[in-house]
Image: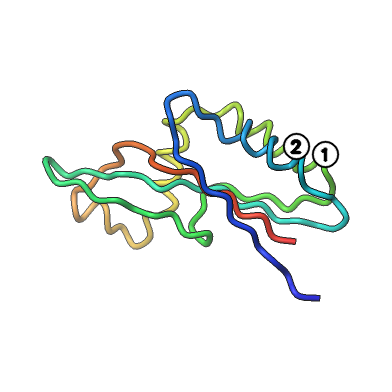
């Protein structure tokens, strides 16, 4: 049996909560096996007047949970619901900070653009 991954993408607006959105997604998923959920964000970073867009690949997603059942997945969504957008921006920036490229370049996280949820079963 081969694993399959589905990616959900949603733009981040001022009242967006990724934990709430994950719960909406989970309400439509059949739980019959272990699933792995990755959650990440793309964001804008700036260095003075220069801005760059950074996509969060699944491998760099700052949040991940292995869920044995629906309760595990909902508990993970509950944890995400408690986080603020600034938490997500910081955690996403730190998860992409491999080899210290941002500190050397002077880029700093500015704002979230999109949320990505990958569900693998």
Q: Is residue 51 above or below residue 118?
A: above
- Per the rendering, the mark at residue 71 is 1
Q: In the figure, is residue 104 to the left or right of 7?
A: left
Farthest-out residue, top: 15
Residue at point 20% right, 46% down?
Answer: 51
Q: In the rendered structure, are the residues bearing label 2 and label 1 in contact, judged by CB atoms less than 8 Å apart?
A: yes
Q: Is residue 109 above or below residue 16?
A: below
Q: Residue at x 45, y 42 (%)?
A: 91
> What's the distance in space between the residues labelled 2 and 1, CA to CA?
5 Å
Q: Give the image location of residue 83, x and y in percent.
A: 54, 29
Question: Between residues 64 and 119, which one lies in front from this camera angle?
Answer: 119
Of all residues, the one furthest to the front in this rendering is 28
The C terminus sits in image quarter? bottom right
In the image: residue 47, left or right of residue 2? left
The quadrant where residue 22 appears: top right
Camera-nearest residue between 34 and 2: 2
Percent position (x, y) of residue 54? 34, 53
The circle drawn on residue 74 is 2
Percent position of residue 106, x then y: 19, 48
Quadrant in which the N terminus appears: bottom right
Residue found at x 38% / y 41%: 113
Kindly state the secondary structure of the residue where label 1 is placed.
helix
Q: Quadrant of residue 120?
A: bottom right
Tag 2 secondary structure: helix
Q: Nearer the viewer, residue 60 or 28?
A: 28
Q: Residues within 10 Å of mark 1 (few under 14, many from 20)?
A: few
Q: Is residue 5 left or right of residue 89?
A: right
């Amino acid at each position: 049996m081969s694993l399959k991954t589905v990616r959900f993408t949603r733009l981040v607006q001022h009242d967006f909560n990724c934990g709430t959105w994950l719960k909406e997604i989970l309400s439509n998923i059949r739980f019959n096996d272990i699933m792995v959920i990755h959650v990440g964000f793309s964001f804008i970073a700036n260095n003075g007047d220069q801005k760059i867009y950074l996509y969060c690949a699944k491998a760099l997603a700052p949040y991940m949970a292995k869920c044995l059942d629906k309760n595990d997945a909902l508990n993970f969504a509950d944890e995400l619901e408690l986080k603020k957008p600034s938490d997500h921006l910081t955690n996403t920036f730190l998860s992409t900070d491999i080899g210290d490229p941002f500190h050397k370049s002077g880029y700093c996280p500015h704002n979230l653009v999109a949320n990505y949820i990958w569900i693998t079963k």
